[in-house]
Amino acid sequence: MSAGKKALFSIPWIGLLLFALLCRVSPGLAALLLDRLTRPALLALNRWAARIPFPLAEPIAFTAGAVALAALVWALSQHRAAALVGWLKGMAAACIITLWVLALTWLPAMVQPVDAPPAPGANQLEWLCAQLIDQLNAAPLSFPEPSEALRLAPEAAGLSGCAVKAARYPEWMRAAGISGLFAPPTGEAIVDAGVSPALTPFTAVHELMHLGGIAGEGAANIAAWERCLAAGGAFADSARLWALRYALGQLNRSDEAAWRRVRGNMKDPLARVFQDCGSEVMPRNRFTLVPGFARIGGDYGDLTGWLLQ
C-alpha cells in the first residue's frame, strides 16, 4: 500500500479517535450532541423501525456475520495472500463504518457523568429487602402477557410513539444471559419475551431509558424505576421485583444469615413468582470498557444503593 493510500485509510480512524477524545474532554459538547443529535436520531430510528414487526438489528447482525465468515472461507480457499489481505481490508472498512455509526448514535451518551451511589451495608440491604417483600406480599402480582407489556411500555416510559420489540431469535439473548438489549444503530429496544411476564414491564422500560439517551446500566435502572413507580400497577410491581432480586443477591453475598432470615418472609404467590423470575441476581464485578466513559456493565445493582440514599 502506498504512503498516500495508507494516509487516506488512516483518516477515518484518526477522526474517530479525535471525536471520542473531544467528547470526553468537553462534557458541554457531548451534552449538546446528545441533546441535538444522538437522542433525536435514536428516537427517529426507533419510530421508523417500529413499522417493521421484528427487530432489524438481528438479521443485520446475523447477515453481516455470515457474509464475513463466507468471505473468509473464500479468501482462505484461494491460497493466495492477496485474497486474505483483501478480506482484512474489507473487514477494516466495515469495522470503521460500524464504529462511526456507534460513535454518532451512542458515544455522547456514554461520556455523560455517572455518579455511583455508595455500596449499601448488610443492615441496609436487609431493611430494603424487608420493605420490598412486604410491598410485594400485599400486591396482586398480576402481570400482562409480554406482548401487552411491550405495547404499554413506551407510554409508561414517557416515550409515546416509540416501540419495544420482542426478539425474533431470543436464544442468543439467553445464551448471553440477558433479558433485554438496546441497539443504537437501529434505535431498537429488544426484549426476550419468553422470560417470566413479571420481568418484562421493567425490562422494557429499562431498554427505553437507553433509547432516551441514558447509557449507564445503573442510571437506566434508576430512571426505569422512577417511570415504573409513576406508572403503577404491574410496572411498579415488576420494578420492585427487579429491585428485590438485586438487593437479595447483594445481601446473600454480604450476610447469608440475614439473607435466609428475610427471604423466609415471602408468602405465596410472591415466592412462586420470585422463583419463576430466576430468584436473586448475584452481583457482578464492575468494569469500565474505556476509562472515563460511563460504565456499561456490572452496575445494574446501583439501584439498591440509590433506593437507600
Image (cartoon, rainbow, N blue to C red):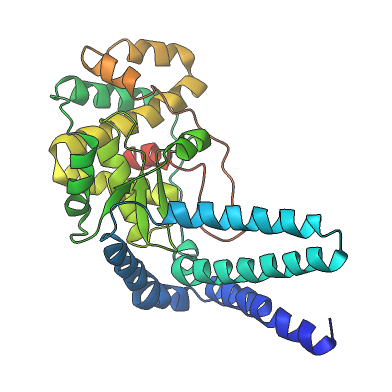
**Which residue does the image show at 19% across and 47% down from the upper left?**
151
x and y, in percent, of residue 110 in the image:
48, 62
User: Looking at the figure, which quarter contains the C terminus?
Assistant: top left
Residue 289, x across and y down, in percent: 60, 53
Determine the image quadrant of residue 142: top left
Direction from residue 63 to residue 53 in the image, left or right = left
Q: How many marks?
A: 0
- Left or right, 299 with respect to 222, comes to right
Residue drawn at (46%, 69%), measured in percent from left and top? 108
- Which quadrant of the view contains residue 168? top left
| 42 up-or-down from 149: above or below | below
**Could you tell me which quadrant the N terminus lies in?**
bottom right
Which residue appears at 46% of the width and 35% of the height?
171
Q: Quadrant of residue 280?
A: top left
**259 with respect to 163 (left or right):** right
**Residue 210 visible, this orientation:** no
Q: Residue 292: horizontal and vertical position, in percent?
A: 58, 61
Residue 70 visible: yes
Compared to residue 273, the image places residue 116 above or below, namely: below
Seen from the viewer's position, the closer of residues 197 and 265 is: 197
Q: Residue furthest bottom?
A: 4
The residue nearer to you, when weighing 303 against 52, is 52
Residue closest to the eye, 265 or 9: 9
| Residue drawn 30% across the image and 49% down it | 165
Can you give x and y, in whole percent of width and height, for residue 239 in the image?
A: 27, 37
